[in-house]
Image (spheres, rainbow, N blue to C red):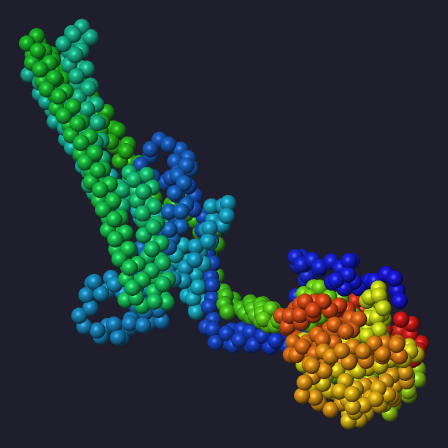
Amino acid sequence: MIANNPFPAPEDPGFTAPEKEIELNISEYVAMVRRHWKLLAVACLVTVVASGIHYAVTPKQYMANATIQIERRNLSPVGSGQNPWLENYWNMEFYPTQYELLQSRGLAVRVVKRLSLMDDPAFNPAAGPARDGKQGTTAADDQATLGRLADQLRGGLAVDPVRNTQLVRLSFQSSSPDFAAKAANAFAESFIDMGVEDRYASAGKASSFLTSQIETLKQEVADKERQLQAFSRTSDIVSLDPAANVVLKRLEALNGGLMDAKKMRIQKEARYHETMTAPPETVADSLSGGVVGGLRGDQLRMERDYETKLKTFKPDWPEMVSLKAQIEKGQQHLDDVIKEMVGKAQGSAYADYQSALRQEQSLENELTNGKKEAIDQSSSAVQFTNLKVEIQTRRELLDQLMRQQSETEVAVRLQDTRQSNIRIIDQALMPGGPFRPSLRKDLTYGLLFGLILGIGGALLIEFLDRTLKTPDEVERRLGLPTLAAIQDIADIGKTYGYSSYASGERPRVRTGRSAPAGWLEKRKGQPQAPAQIELVPHERPRTLISEAYRSLRTALLLSSAGELKVVAVTSAVAGEGKTATAANLAVVLAQLGRPVLIVDCDLRKPRLHQVFKVSNRVGLVNQLTGTAEPEAVILPTEVPNLWVVPSGPMPPNPSELLSSARIREWLNAMRERFDYVIIDTPPALAVTDATLIGMLADGVVLTLRGHKVTREEARLVRDRLRQADIKILGAVLNRYQALQTGVATGYRYYEAYGAAYGAEDGEVTKAGGSAA
């Protein structure tokens, strides 16, 4: 035996419990997916076909793009003395307000009118003869239809600001490529028109007010000049020197102050009239500091959200009713804020006007008193000077108003030139192809979704599968060394690494190299796969399964530092291949040239007599009951150096027989006669027979069938054996499907190497030629 033990048992001093893995093993997940590649393929196929159907049934949508530039400069019709480029520079709400205006219903209404969509049957099915023949259509109905069409038009518009620029891209989607281009251009042009009209609407009103004031001043100047001429003729006064008269200087100063007060009063009055006649929204925007713009933006967002949800829900849906109430409440709040702002503006302008008027009246009263005083001194001179000063001040005021009127009229005339801070950079062109659906995107998303679905399904199946499948998993989950991994006999063609050789071609191993010459001739006439796995090392010693059992033999002999002569083979449940493992282990031990005895201790469902084709009339039961001699139950087999003890007739009390002192004495006698004794036992979880035999043996080999025995069953049988102080030598994984795991474990490397090595040498270890 070997002094050093590379496979310590749990009860040995060198045994340490396996550490729980916490790292992410990608290869295990790849193996899980590879085991379920058919599910992955079906999922991908279904999703790709579904994507193709989606592409075929989805209506074609076309998108046209127009690009506009929005500058910050101010184009106020009346000069304010500020730099037009800097006036809106610090207005952070400027561009968000412009983006909301582009998506407003008011702009959409302009586009509907511009394109005459109310009369277009393609856009408005109620138009045409049906609408002309409908009686009782009111202006309110037309307005409702206009709003509905505007909301419908807004649904196809998308506003996309170009980052870090003044450019805005307007995109419109429609089922008609021509209409998509027309609508995108109409939105851009209507937005420019709306800005021009709003900007110059107040300019016309200011011009009308200034014209009326100028006419009044002209009439006053003419009246004063006639009075001055008449007074000069009656009083014979041609000129006076006001510098020498204090009263006249005071009158002159009062006249100057009165003219300033009149000018101030006229400006305040003009401001008051402007607030009374200008649109309430314009007045509120100028005074709210962005509050009205923010409220209007919130209102537009709620309306747009309502229109979007209207495509999914009905108007009487509770959520839609609640949202509609919020919109109406927000509109009422916006109207109240505008009304409040306009009221404040009108009140402030009126107060300023009244203050200027009172100041003018006060100066007029002081001037009247000064005139009386001057009349006492020289009524004629004062009156002459007063008329002259009044004429001069009125002329100066008239000149100033006429200059303002000229500027305003120029601004009004500029409206025809459509001067604006917004200009179209790129006109929308008719799209050459549909924007959606996209066959490439649909297939890509379908394939991606299929991969996600297939991989998710495969991983879900794997995580729901509680069975043991790989040697690594056995070692990790149970903490037991894997003595051998025996592949499934059904996959022997793939397991051997050879392709079909029925056609006469030289087979190839998994390494890619051809088998040696003459191999095919030797294989002809032999079955490609044995009918059963029992006795494969004897009947087919050159197969990889036979080599796997020889590896089991080597690992078993190295698994214990003490004497190892009696080995019991058991499993958790039935059907895990314990009988095949015991039989083939006995065969490969016999191939060492040493006497080996295999005993069938499965007294409930014995099978060894069928495997070795011997009689089961006399066996272990007869020996334990004293009805047969020891030599009568030990039968030779066709395998050299191997004898078998069948179970014999089925007893009514198997557990009592296996727990008797007679079996202990008989096993001690067999230890002296044979080098190795292999015992086949029943499943350990089903009955206690395996535990009773394991206590008499030097160690137990636990047989596990891949993809059948669960982790819980394997842990339970391990714990049961350990509680009985039974030494577990290791585990054998039967029906190991290496081709399906996809994990490059040492077992797969060994298989590939073994196949190539055996093919090159054309030799295999004969009985007694393999060293332990």
On screen, residue 174 above or below 490: above
Residue 407 image point, x, y percent: 31, 36
Q: Is residue 181 above or below residue 713?
A: above
Q: Which x, y percent locates residue 388?
A: 16, 18
Q: Residue at x 78, y 77 (%)?
A: 664
Nearer to the camera, 648 or 122: 648
Q: Provide residue 195's location: percent of width, then percent of height.
A: 34, 48
State which quadrant residue 32 falls in: bottom right
Q: Nearer the viewer, residue 108 or 732?
A: 732
- Quarter holding the C terminus is bottom right
Residue sitting at the far top: 244
Quarter of the image where one finds residue 253: top left
Classify the position of the N terminus by image quarter.
Answer: bottom right
The residue closer to the viewer here, 759 or 562, is 562
Query: Residue 123, relative to residue 170: is it above or below?
Result: below
Indicate left or right for 131 with 18 as reference: left
Q: Nearer the viewer, residue 353 or 35?
A: 35
Residue lying at 73% horizontally and 58% vertically, measured from the top left: 16
Residue positioned 30% across, 66% down in the render: 317
Asked whether residue 570 appears in the rendered view, the answer is no
Counting every numbered tag in the picture gives 0
